[in-house]
Image (tube, grey):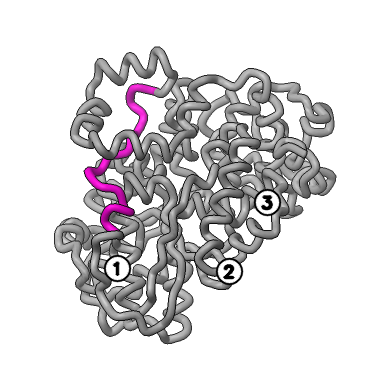
Amino acid sequence: MTALDNARASLARASLDQCVKCTICETQCPVAEATPLFPGPKYVGPQAERLRHGESVDYSLDYCSGCSICSTVCPQGVKIAEINAQARAVMKANHMPLRDRLITQTELEGKLLTPFAPIANAALKNRPIRKVVSAVVGVHEDAPMPKAQRHSFHHWFKRHTPVASPTRGPLVFFHGCAGGYFEVETSKATVEVLEYLGYEVIVPPQGCCGLAFQSNGLLDSAAKKVRKLSNQLRAVGKDLTIVSSSGSCAGMMRHEAHEIMGLEDPELLDVGSRMVETSEFLVELLHKGEFPVEDLHRIDAVIPYHQPCQVKSQGIGKPAIELMEAIPGVTVIESGRGCCGIAGTYGLKKEKYEVAQRVGRPLFDMVRNTNPNLAACETETCRWQIRKGSGAEVIHPVQLIHAALGLGGAELVEQAERAGTAVR
């Protein structure tokens, strides 16, 4: 049975008849608000699913970004985004664009770019090169791009000295592709905060979670990736907590692989049940009185914060706000926006770039009006989108904790405080 067959038979489609056509999902959809090219999640989801029986009847479905807001807000529990993702995979199965196959190769891209970071970054900023890429590959010339790093996270981890002796036992760190090659500072900060708290941090060899493959309809490839990763994360201990600062990749393990792809592998379900996002993990320690709040240095700043769609869909609340406000002097202002527009690889595509920018514009304005120097967000591609759109540096919340614990980040504190009292 293929992953596509699993998806067709999944529980998401079983929720279809719970739709009462209340249109709440329509009113909350950021893509439908931004473009008439997408008629809305209800129309292309539960309504169209009754007609297509596994075959797409409306190619506007491809404008769904997969943000999952529709599923999150549905009062009837209809798995709208999951139904749409399954239908899109069927629709694209026989004519998958080469571009969509290429941009899913996040791990390979990291391995190729890291050894040539200065050259790669210069090329990614070169306008003529970006125009050629846009014309030939279909990635928009202005789309936000990651910054290649001189060294991978694993290169750093093998050589670093723990900041404290372990007193609490081991846990596993899952960094994701972007955290391994592009957002390396987030991964380093996570490890050092966990070590400061007394944990022995284990980082096993780990590959891609398959999220980019899944969101582009390549379900069989995604299934291979996520199954391999599950075995890699289980190899170091079958009862250890798995902490991840990649909110989207954690979401793949906890939600998408099961709800969208219909995978019921015991190994995958086990890993998903032990996976926690970093902010979620640290706030639980706060609640237990096991986090040394007295060690946090004061930072006088107002931090604009955006929770990404794939973190919202995990149903964990907004622990990042409580975590950052545990720092004396910090006030967090939540963005109030459902989506930044990037939706993984969606906003990179030439035909969807303008839609993604229209979705994100109110968020960019909010960041500039709150603190134009620094904002916080849990997923990597969302940080790239907000950085480019607002001009602010955008960090994972754990990086602010890292700075407040005195583990580094003096420049980050200066950025936070420079305009941080603007809305007090």
Residues 189 and 294: in front is: 189
Q: Earlier in the sequence, mark 1 or mark 3?
A: 1
Q: Say what secondary structure mark 3 lies in.
A: helix
- Cα distance between the residues tagged 1 and 2: 23 Å
Residue 202 in percent (x, y) is at 41, 66
Residue 299 in percent (x, y) is at 22, 69
Residue position for label 3: 258
Residue position for label 1: 192
- Cα distance between the residues tagged 2 and 3: 19 Å
Q: Say what secondary structure mark 2 lies in.
A: loop
Give the answer, above or below, for where 356 lies relative to 421: above
Residue position for label 2: 238
- 231 left or right of 43 in image: left
Depth-wise, is mark 1 or mark 2 nearer the camera? 2
Q: Quadrant of the C terminus?
A: bottom left
Q: Earlier in the sequence, mark 2 or mark 3?
A: 2
Q: For mark 3, does the 10 Å Cα neighbourhood hold few (<14), some (14 to 19), or many (20 or more) residues?
A: many
Q: Say what secondary structure mark 1 lies in.
A: helix
Task: Confirm or deny contact between disc 1 and disc 3 (CB under 8 A).
Answer: no
Q: Residue at x 19, y 65 (%)?
A: 408
Q: Which residues are magenta?
A: 140-157
Q: Amino acid at mark 2?
A: Lys
Judge whether residue 330 can be spotted in this image: yes
Depth-wise, is mark 2 or mark 3 nearer the camera? 2
